Amino acid sequence: MADAVVIPGGMFGPGAPLLMYAGDVAEQRGATVHRYSWSQEFPRPDEAAIEGWVSGEVAPLIDTIGGRPLLIAKSLGTNAAAIAAERSLPAVWLTPLLALPWVADALGRATAPFLLVGGTADKVWDADLARRLSPHVLEVEGADHGMYVPGPLTESIAVLSRVVVAVEEFLDAIGWPG
């Protein structure tokens, strides 16, 4: 049986829409989904210490699960890219912190496939870097760090649907779960 670990961002927990639906995609494929919540206040997200803090929070859960779980993370949680690189874990990185050098470096060391999802209005998104790091990229024109786009809220809800499709297509492409 496959497992997926959902790792939150800094503002919202694992039940926030992007993470909830991405985890639901894994669950519909028969995976056991482990939705993680931070156990304590996190350090400043723009300091290198955050990478070790995230690893310290998430690694014990991954160790308990064992095997090669799919990681699904948003924003702050994408600091788990170092764990994914070390353990060759496939991943879905939602609004990854590509502007942070340690996150970009960890993604560059990854040997397992990963999907990058971001928007052109997100200050931490780097479209060129994303495309160099992975062939699996969903970039949404005008989307900010929350994947909201200008205009009626229904337009942002439509973005959520696009993200779900991208996750499904990515997991199909890599044959997950195998």
Image (tube, rainbow, N blue to C red):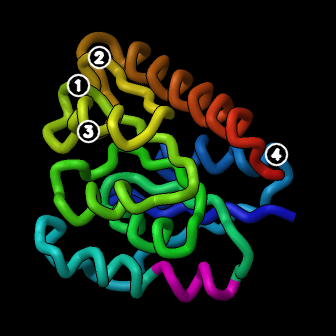
Q: Position of residue 94 (x, y in %)?
A: 41, 45
Residue receiving disc 3: 129
- Specify the amino acid type for callout 2: Glu
Residue contact at pointers 1 and 2, CB within 8 angstroms: yes
Task: Give the crowd class for mark 1: few <14, some 14-19, many >=20 residues within 10 Å.
Answer: some
- Counting residues from the N terminus, which is met first, the one under dot 2 or under dot 4? 4
Query: What residue is drawn where x is 16% and y is 75%?
Result: 48
Task: Give the crowd class for mark 4: few <14, some 14-19, many >=20 residues within 10 Å.
Answer: few
Residue 138 forms part of the magenta stretch: no
Query: What residue is drawn where x is 48% and y is 74%?
Result: 86
Tell me which segment is drawn in magenta: 58-64
- Mainly helix, strand or loop, the magenta region? helix
Task: Give the crowd class for mark 2: few <14, some 14-19, many >=20 residues within 10 Å.
Answer: some
- Specify the amino acid type for callout 4: Arg
Task: Tell me if I can see residue 10 in this picture.
Answer: no
- Counting residues from the N terminus, which is met first, the one under dot 2 or under dot 3? 3
Residue receiving disc 1: 120
Q: Is residue 97 above or below residue 64?
A: above
For residue 29, the mark is 4
The answer to whether residue 31 is left or right of residue 134 is right
Q: Position of residue 17 (x, y in %)?
A: 50, 42
For residue 141, the mark is 2
Q: For the residue labelled by badge 3, is the local secondary structure a helix, a strand or a loop?
A: helix
- Counting residues from the N terminus, which is met first, the one under dot 4 or under dot 1? 4
Q: Is residue 29 above or below residue 84?
A: above
